[in-house]
Image (cartoon, rainbow, N blue to C red):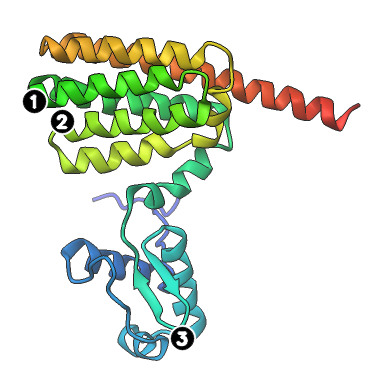
Amino acid sequence: MAISSPHELNFNPIIQTPIAEKVVHHILSLVQAGNLKAGDKLPSEKELMTLFDVSRPTLREALRALSILGITETKKGSGTHISNLDAEKLLAPLSFYINLDNNNLSDTFECRRILECEMVGKAAVNVTDIEIVELERLLMVQDSVIDDPIGFRIADQQFHELLADIARNSVLKRVAAGMYNIGMESRRKATDIEGVIGQSICDHRKIVAALKIRDPIAAYHAMANHLIQIELSTKEALEDSRVTEINRLGP
């Protein structure tokens, strides 16, 4: 039997997981299992150091990571608590990553299309007559604030939140809310572009029309077209901001 030489063997390096990372994963598993819930206060640093058998610097590194991830928050005079686990807060690191590069923004809108098109398709199946009335009321509100970008953004968020409610999936609703808020600063600028608000209201009308006839396919395509329009206007707003910044800095 031939024995392979060391050069022929494919050894993968053994990767040691940092101790702080192990602490992070342990606390995350406790949250996932329900042993730690939103609002729960963690033991003191001294107690945690004993429980995990780690040094103070290691523990603080782990707690910093959990805070950045939005899992924990420190309340003055009250110690460290599990956060409310809000989707927007948990997706904040992703929002930062997306804002680094335009290609990341394109990927974000692709995710939104995958998510929200399916969501509105479910909404078309589940929507009630009362909810149709509420959607139409929101369309009227949007018409009334067509010249008010701030007012429109408030009404727009209410519209998308109601669609998520109608889909009847609590996890989908939380994720959709987080994705909606990613890149919000850029979309604020986009609503200042002439015609953007009017286009969005027109898109919303097509979505509601599809829901009224309980047509999930039509609703799917109406939402897809809406998100394409939002992506285009957001990228236009970002480009305008870059040009303005370049002109401000000068040659």
Q: Residues within 10 Å of mark 3 (few under 14, many from 20)?
A: some
Q: Position of residue 231 (x, y in %)?
A: 47, 20
- Please determine whether, in this image, residue 151 is positioned above or below residue 26: above
Residue beneath label 1, please? 126
**Front tag of 3 and 2:** 2
In this rendering, which labeled residue sits more in front, label 3 or label 1? 1
Q: Amino acid at mark 2?
A: Ala
Q: Is residue 237 above or below residue 29?
A: above
Q: Are marks 2 and 1 in contact (CB under 8 Å)?
A: yes
Residue at 28% in and 9% down: 206
Secondary-structure class at tag 3: loop
Residue furthest right in the image = 251
Marks 3 and 2, the one that precedes in the sequence:
3
The residue indicated by pointer 3 is: 55
Residue 9 shows in this picture: no
Badge 3 amino acid: Ser
Q: Position of residue 155 (x, y in %)?
A: 37, 29
Instruction: Name the residue nearer the viewer: 225 or 204.
Output: 204
Coordinates of residue 229 in the picture (x, y in percent): 44, 14
